[in-house]
Image: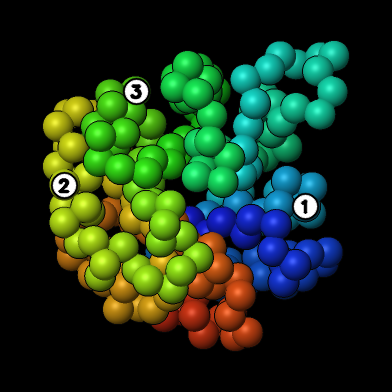
Amino acid sequence: MFVINCKNYEEISGDRIIKFVKIVEKVSKKYKVKIAIAPPQHLIALVANSSIPILAQHIDNSKVGSTTGFVIPELLKKSKVSGSLINHSEHRISSKEITKLVLKLKKLKMVSVLCVKNVSEARKYARLNPNYIAIEPPELIGSGKAVSKEKPGLITKAADAVKSAKNNTKLLCGAGIVSGEDVAKAIELGSKGILVASGIIKVKDWNKVITEFAKSMV
């Protein structure tokens, strides 16, 4: 799994998100790599009908109905959104909320990508059986220093922690990934995919960098 978090970067604003998704679709099909993107929340509707999985960047544990301003998974599903990131380091939530949201997405048969900052959180939340756990040391996010190079032991330990839950959860590696070499190293260390943001969105030639990452996965 190859997840691209667009965050709220200006580079992806307006109808540029449509151009970006078309590039991702092309690369995904050519290299047979599953690529999902998480657009800014207000742009989801522009790309929800694409051939690749679309994820929300955050969801709220709130009810359908009179709940103004909340992002509700039940309504996202009706808009053909596949799932959501949960507990990203830039939008941390409580353990109680994490548990409820993972269970809610599971009930809705939607994809959960649960972000954690260390091995202990990976071990703890793997028991909830989310689809993916993405380990991202906060100090390396957006740094250009890949966790696969700076802290390789963190990935192998996280992979072991996730395996210890003995369920279907898979580990993704994030933070500072900027090259195909970083991607290949993460896979070698036990990751089943990557979660990347600025390493792609802020690069001028999207096709080139997405292709490089995809080729490194296969």
User: How far is mark 2 from mark 3, CA to CA?
Assistant: 18 Å
- Kind of residue at badge 3: Leu
Name the residue: 58% across, 40% down.
Answer: 91
The residue lying toward the viewer, choosing from 105 and 144, is: 144
Task: Look at mark 3 in the image and give the residue it sits on.
Answer: 128
Judged left or right of residue 131, residue 61 is: right
Question: Which numbered marker is on residue 10?
Answer: none
Q: Earlier in the sequence, mark 3 or mark 1?
A: 1
In this rendering, the label closer to the viewer, 1 or 2: 2
Task: Look at mark 1 in the image and give the residue it sits on.
Answer: 43
Task: Look at mark 2 in the image and give the residue it sits on.
Answer: 157
| Residue 29, percent from left and from top | 49, 68
Q: Circle 1 — which element?
A: helix
Q: Residues within 10 Å of mark 3 (few under 14, many from 20)?
A: some
Judged left or right of residue 13, residue 23 is: left
| Residue 43, percent from left and from top | 77, 52
The residue lying toward the viewer, choosing from 180 and 153, is: 153
- Kind of residue at badge 1: Leu
The residue lying toward the viewer, choosing from 45 and 143, is: 143
